[in-house]
Image (cartoon, rainbow, N blue to C red):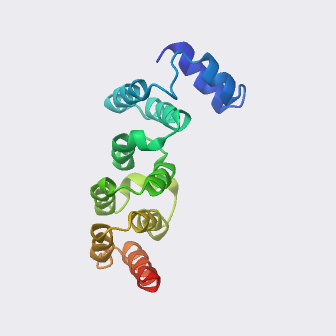
């Protein structure tokens, strides 16, 4: 991504330019070039620089069709070097792909240490993940909810028990 591209992202973020103007002026047609977005995101993750990662995540949202970036979104769900976890979780919930389940498990195993920046209670964060697993809806996803309904972490345990009750009511 060029310095001009980065400046365009900043201008878009601050409302100086519209999304249409951004897409017109950006050096690459990101709506049609998923490979560019993928490579830029991988490079940003490799740097570990939270500002770079946060900026590059914007490309995923601007490119649309988030399913194309499932692998990146899964990795970003557990990557501590940004502050977009809730938005990423919501996008993964909409995609509802079983490939996300191992990443949710990894997140639940951390007790959300890397999500302290949210200033949210454990139970609130656990809710993101219970909804994500619920949206996936496979037996494997429900098994993960069951597993973490036995968690030593009270916030996780209570949320997963709550979600299990909702699942039983849906049947």
Image x and y of residue 109, in percent: 28, 62
Q: Quadrant of the C terminus?
A: bottom left
Residue found at x 63% / y 19% = 24
Residue 5 in sight here: yes
- 87, above or below 153, in the image: above
Along the line of sight, the residue nearer the viewer: 134 or 123: 134
- 142, above or below 95, in the image: below
- 170, above or below 6, in the image: below
Q: Quadrant of residue 48?
A: top left
Along the line of sight, the residue nearer the viewer: 171 or 3: 171
Q: Is residue 38 left or right of residue 151?
A: right
Q: Quadrant of residue 73?
A: top left
Image x and y of residue 38, in percent: 38, 30
Image x and y of residue 117, in percent: 48, 51
Residue found at x 39% / y 63% = 136
Residue 81 in sight here: no
Q: Is residue 146 left or right of residue 52?
A: left
Residue found at x 38% / y 72% = 156
Residue found at x 39% / y 75% = 160
Image x and y of residue 9, in percent: 58, 26
């Amino acid at each position: 991504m060029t310095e001009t591209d980065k400046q365009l992202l900043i201008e878009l973020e601050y409302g100086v330019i519209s999304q249409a103007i951004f897409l017109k002026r950006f050096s690459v047609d990101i709506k049609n070039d998923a490979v560019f977005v993928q490579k830029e995101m991988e490079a940003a993750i490799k740097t570990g620089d939270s500002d770079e990662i946060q900026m590059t995540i914007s490309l995923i949202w601007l490119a649309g069709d988030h399913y194309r970036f499932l692998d990146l979104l899964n990795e970003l769900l557990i990557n501590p070097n940004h502050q977009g976890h809730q938005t990423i979780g919501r996008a993964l919930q909409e995609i509802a792909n079983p490939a996300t389940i191992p990443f949710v498990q990894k997140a639940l195993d951390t007790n959300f240490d890397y999500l302290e920046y949210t200033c949210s209670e454990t139970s609130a964060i656990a809710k993101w993940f219970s909804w994500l697993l619920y949206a996936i809806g496979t037996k494997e996803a429900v098994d993960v909810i069951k597993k973490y309904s036995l968690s030593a972490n009270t916030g996780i345990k209570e949320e997963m028990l709550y979600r299990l009750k909702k699942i039983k009511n849906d049947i």
